[in-house]
Structures are given as C-alpha cells and as structure tokens.
Image (cartoon, rainbow, N blue to C red):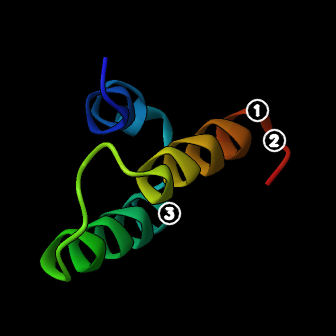
Amino acid sequence: MNPLEEITKIAHLLPLKVLQDINTRIGDWLASGGNETDPYIHQQLRFAKRFIEGEA
C-alpha cells in the first residue's frame, strides 16, 4: 500500500488540525513536482502514526 493510502486509512484517528497540516504539506509537495511515494510522504505517514500513538 502506498503511504497516501495508509494516511487515508488512519485519517479518522487524527484531529482535524493535524490532518489539515499533513494534507497541506503533501499537497505542496505534490504541487512542486514530488511523487506520492517519495520519502517525504513516508515521513508524513510516520508522523501521523506517531501522533496516534501519542509520541508526537
């Protein structure tokens, strides 16, 4: 599964403000020519998972 799909699966567990921040960052990345499977997108997924686990 690609990182965007994984973020979509756990989005309901994130506060709206956090989800909006991740969405903006990913949107900016993609708009600047990045790919949805780039390490930066994986980094956003790791952040989301850490947030849910209470580590962020």
* Amino acid type of the residue tagged 2 in the rendering: Gly
For the residues labelled 2 and 3, say whether their Cβ atoms are less than 8 Å apart: no
- Badge 2: how crowded within 10 Å, few (<14), some, or many (20+)? few
Residue identified by numbered label 3: 18
For the residues labelled 1 and 3, say whether their Cβ atoms are less than 8 Å apart: no
Between 26 and 17, the residue placed more toward the observer is 26
Q: Is residue 5 left or right of residue 55?
A: left
- Badge 3: how crowded within 10 Å, few (<14), some, or many (20+)? some
Q: Is residue 44 left or right of residue 23?
A: right
Q: Is residue 39 left or right of residue 55?
A: left
Q: Identify the image quadrant of residue 30.
A: bottom left
At a point 76% along the width and 32% down the height, the residue shown is 53
In primary-sequence order, the first of circles 2 and 3 is 3
State the residue lying farthest toward the top. Answer: 1
Residue identified by numbered label 2: 54
* Amino acid type of the residue tagged 3 in the rendering: Val
Count how many numbered circles sit on residues in the image.
Answer: 3
In the image, is residue 25 above or below residue 37? below
Between 56 and 15, the residue placed more toward the observer is 56
Q: Give the structural element (helix, strand or loop) at label 2.
A: loop
Residue identified by numbered label 1: 53
* Amino acid type of the residue tagged 1 in the rendering: Glu
Q: Is residue 54 left or right of residue 2?
A: right
At a point 24% along the width and 49% down the height, the residue shown is 36
Q: Give the structural element (helix, strand or loop) at label 3.
A: helix
Residue at mark 2 to residue at mark 3: CA–CA distance: 13 Å
